Image (spheres, rainbow, N blue to C red):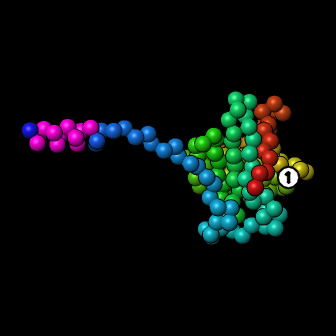
Amino acid sequence: MKQILLMIAVVVVGCGKKEAPKPQVKAKALQTTEKPDKELTEEEKKFIGEYERKSKDGVTSKYVLLKNGAFEGYRGDDKAMQLWLDSKWKIVDGEIRVKIVSIREWVWRINEDGSITYIAEIWKDGQNKERTDVSKEEQSTYIKIK
């Protein structure tokens, strides 16, 4: 009888379903200690920070330009696509370029108010690069929040 009561107690206590805590996604510290692949220029250092926008469907997207040249992307509470884990950013010809994967770069215009606007993509095919500008309707502006 003791064994039956013990088994019931184990089942009742051990099977209690706990709700898993919602993951809190936060950007790496902007002052990360990871050694950069290359030193950022003074111009690039001005753009270290977090940029955010709210989409038409009400979901907040955040992009983070880190001081070690790394890039992070978030949508809502979830870290964005795993492809972005090794992404890097730099300034080329007055535009911010984020290398998403080895064959694709995003291009952002730097606005006078410190915000950035997604304006183009560059696809690399072997030695050739093809830039495709984004239509005005598809462009999105991110406001610097930190």
Q: Is residue 36 magenta?
A: no
- Please give the name of the residue rendered at 61% of the width and 52% of the height, measured from the top-left corner: 26
Q: Could you tell me what secondary structure mostly forms the magenta stretch?
A: helix
Left or right: residue 39 versus residue 35 is right
Q: Is residue 11 magenta?
A: yes
- Please give the name of the residue rendered at 70% of the width and 49% of the height, measured from the top-left corner: 63
Please state, as top left, top right, bottom left or bottom right, where the N terminus lies in the image.
Answer: top left
Residue wearing tag 1: 114
How far from the left and from the top, in percent, is residue 34?
61, 68
Residue at far right of view? 112
Q: Nearer the viewer, residue 127 or 97?
A: 97
Left or right: residue 14 versus residue 38 is left
Quarter of the view holding residue 47: bottom right
Left or right: residue 103 versus residue 48 is left
Please state, as top left, top right, bottom left or bottom right, where the C terminus lies in the image.
Answer: bottom right
- Please give the name of the residue rendered at 69% of the width and 46% of the height, measured from the top-left corner: 62
Q: Which residues are the magenta region?
A: 2-12
Q: Does 33 appear above or below 56?
A: below
Q: Nearer the viewer, residue 123 or 85?
A: 85
Residue 31 visible in this rendered orientation of the protein: yes
Q: Secondary structure at mark 1?
A: loop
Residue 83 visible in this rendered orientation of the protein: no
How far from the left and from the top, in percent, is residue 13?
28, 41
Q: Does 146 appear above or below 136?
A: below
> How crowded is the residue under tag 1: few (<14 C-alpha within 10 Å), some, or many (20+)?
few
Q: Nearer the viewer, residue 41 or 49?
A: 49
Q: Nearer the viewer, residue 23 or 113?
A: 23
